[in-house]
Amino acid sequence: MRKLFTIIIGLTLIFSVKLEAQKTFMEGDIMSSDAINPDNFNEKLFQDVLVYKINAYMDSIGLEGFEIHDFFLNPAREHALIMSETGEANLNGRGSMATVRDRLVFAGGTGIGAEVVARANIKVSNEYINYDDLANQTFEKWKDGKYSKDLLSQKYFFVGISGKVDKSQKKIFTSMYMGNYASFISGSGNALELSGPISVKSQGLKLYDEKVCKKTVRKMPNIVDLQEGLSINDKGEIVFKYNDLKKFRRFIKASKDGLAVDVVQKEQFNRCKSENFADYSKINIGFMTKKMFSKKIYKKNIAAGEGRRNKVTKLEVVLGELPAIFEPKDIELNLMIIKEKYVCHNIPQSWVDHKIYDFVPKISLMPDTILPAGINEYAPTATSSELNFRIPFEQGKFNYKPEDMKPVLSALNEPDFIINKIFIEAYSSLEGSIAENAVLQKKRAQSIVKALEENQNASIVDSIITAPNLKDLQNDCKSTIFEEVCDMNLEEAVVYVNSKAKEMEMFLENHRYANVTIWVTYDIDGEKEQKYVLAQFNKAVEAGQINAALTIQKYILKRVVEGRYNENAVSEMRIPAGRDYVGLNMNKIWLTQFIYMDVLDEDYLTKIDDLNKLDQTNIYVDFNDVLCEVILTDLDNERTQQTLQNRIDKMYNTSLRVDLVDLLNIELQYQIMDIYKDSLGYDHPSVIKTMDKIKEIIHIDELTWENSLKLASVFINHSDYGYAIRLLEPWIKEENIPLVYLTTYATVCSKVDYKVHSNNFVYVLDKIRKKDPEFFCDLFKGDKLSVQTFVNTRAKQIYCETCKK
C-alpha cells in the first residue's frame, strides 16, 4: 500500500513519503515485544529492532538508512563489553585500541567509520523492559544528543550493533559502528599487477582530522569543484587553475596549507575480474606528487596579468610532472587539499548532467544586444578601400624585399587585404645627376611594386610617376642659410646641392620617399575575418555610428561564444567613455568576463555601477548592476535586501524577459537564505521566507517530480549538492520518473562526500542502465563520473555486467 510521510527539508517543503505501522520482530522464539532476559540477551533481535527504528526515522526526514554488515559486529561487541565492565558509555578504549579508528583498523579495516554508544536502564520497577522499548530509549538518546551528527551525516551506510548487559543486570551498554565501502581494505597484495607505482611515503602529511578540516567547506563551499581545475598540459605537467586568486588565498593561506595530486590508475578500480586496489587508511590512493605549500604555490603562479594594470587575478600553478610510465587516458587526477599538514580532502573528478540547466539555468551577466528598430543584423562582406602611405628611402638604396614592406603595411593598422592596383609617386633628393636620379627613382618604384606583389602572391597593375624633389627642398630651405636655392630652377638647384650635399643632408634625407596609393579588397577568409570585423567596429565607433557599432559588436559576441574569435576581438575594441557608449562598454565587460572566465568581483561591480550611473535607463546594465550587488554586497541588512528587491520587482515591468528577471530574483533569495541556512538551519524564519519566495518564483504549487527538479537545480547552481540530493531523493523510486531526473540524481551524488557508497545511488544507476544502457556506459568513459565510483562494488558489478560483456 502506498504510504505518505512528510519531509521537511530545511523548511516546510512537503513530499509524498511513507508511514509504516509498528513492526514486531522475532528471533527464534523471542519477539521484540517480549521482556528482556538479562541472562539470555538476544543481540541479533536487538540489532534488527534498533536498525529498523533508526531507518524509519531517517526515512521520515528524507535521509537514507543503514544496512547491517558483519564487518562492524566484532568491534561493536568488543567495545560494548568494555563499557559494560567499566560502567561508562563513551568512545574511549584501551591501549592500542584507544580510538574508534584504532578499533576499526584492528578489525582489519581502514579505520574509516564512526561509533555511537549508549547506556540504557532495562529494569524499571523490578520489571524488565522489552526490546522495542530498549531500541526506542537508545535511539532517542542518539537522535537528540551529541551523536546525531555522525548518525545523520549520510557518510555511512553500513552498521553493526552490539549490546552487553552489565554485572548488575540492570543496564545495557550499546555500541553501534558505522562505515561505508571505504572502511574495507581491498586488493592488498596485488600492487605488482598495476602498470604504475603506488606511493607509500606520506611526505610528512597526516590523515584527516575533524577539528582541522571541518572549516574547509565553510571557507570553500564548492570545494568539490576545485578538482575541475586540474589538467595535464602538452609538456606532461600537471597544472592547477582557479579563477579567483583572492578567494583562494583566503582558503590556502597558512604556511602548512597546500596542494598535492593523487594520480589514480583506472585499473585500480575498473578491472571486472579483480578486486579494487585501494587502501583508504592512507592519505593517498595512487601515486602522489610532491606536496606544495602555500608560499610556493603563490610564488610559482604563472597566471597572466590582465587589464591596464596587468593585475594577476587568477591562479595557475604547475603542481608536478606526470611520470612517463602513466598515460593520461589511463589515469585520473585527484586534488589533495592540505590544511596544517593534514590531508583534509582527496577529491576525485565529478560531473553533473547539464540537462539540469534546462530547468533553472545558471545566472550570469547579460549583454546589451537588442538592436533598434530598422537596424539589420550585421554580416561581414568583403569591401574595397583606398589606402595611402609613404615609404622613406635610404640614400642609394633601391632594392626592396617583401620583408621590407611588412612593417610598412602593418603600420597602416588595417585588416588583411588583397591589393588590386598601385599608384606610386617616387621622389629623390637632388644630389647626383638628374639622369642618375631618374634611374634610381624608377628602380625604387619598381622594386616596391615587386615586393608588394610577392607579399600578395599576385601580379598587380601599377602606375609609376618619378620626379626629383625640388618642391620639398625649396620649402624646407626657406629662412635658412640655404634660402637662395628657393629661387633656382632644377638644373641650378642640382648644381647647388651637389656643392653642399654634406651640409644639407639633414634636409635631403627627408626628400627621398615614395607616396603610395593602393586600392584594396579586404580579405575576410578564415581567421582574417576577426581583424576585419574589429576594424569595422572601431571605425563605426570613431564615426559616432552607435547603432552600426552595436550590430557589429553583436556579431563579434556571437563569434566569441562560438570560439571562432579570440581575446583580441575584445581587448582591441576602442570605445570611449560617455553615456552614448554605455551599451557598447557593457558588452565589452560581458565579453571580457566570458573569455577570461572571471568571477564577478569588486572591479566588475565598480565598472558596471559606473555605467549604471551614466545611464540608468539601460535595463541590461541595471540588471547586471543588481546581479553584482546581490553577489558581492553584505545582505545581512534588511534595508539592503529590500532595496535590491524593489529594483528587481521594477524589472518585471520592462522589456526584459520574465524568466531572466526570475533568475535574478532567485539569486537574491538564495543569497539571503545562504546567510542563515548553514549556521541557523533551514527552519530559520528568514530561510523559510526566502524558500517560499523561490517556490513562488518557479511556480511550485503542487508536489511533482518536475517541481522537485526545478528547486534542486537552484541549489545545484550554487554548488549546494547535498541539499539538492535531499530534494531529489523522495522521487527516485517512482515508477515513471524520467531519465533526466535519474541522471541528475546519480551525477549529483558524485559531488557529495560518500554518497556514491549508498544503496540509493546503486538503485538509480540500475534504473539508468535499464532505461539507456549506452548512456549508462558513457558515464564512465573518462570525462564524467570517476572510476573511483566503483569503490561501491555493487555499482561496479552493474557496470561490468552492462558495459564489459
Image: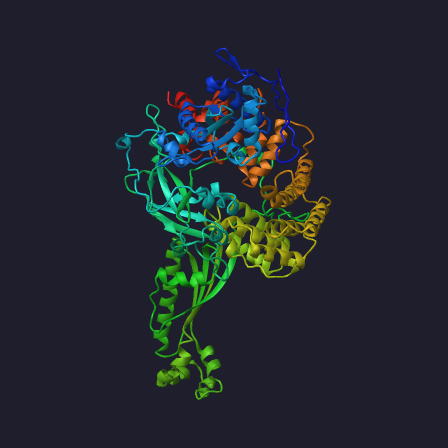
Does 304 appear above or below 775? below
Residue projecting furthest to the left = 192
- Residue 264 visible here: yes
**Residue 325 left/right relative to 352:** left
Q: Quadrant of residue 574?
A: bottom right
Report x, y in % for residue 676: 62, 44
Residues 531 and 716: in front is: 716
Report x, y in % for residue 685: 68, 41
Residue at 58 percent across and 42 percent down: it is 678
Does 2 appear above or below 448? above
Q: Quadrant of residue 287?
A: top left
Report x, y in % for residue 77: 42, 26
Residues 694 and 639: in front is: 639
- Residue 654 visible here: no
Report x, y in % for residue 565: 49, 48
Does 265 appear above or below 795? below
**Residue 803 left/right relative to 739:** left
Colour convention: rainbow
Residues 434 and 549: in front is: 549
Residue projecting furthest to the top = 29
Question: What quarter of the picture does the C terminus occupy?
Answer: top left
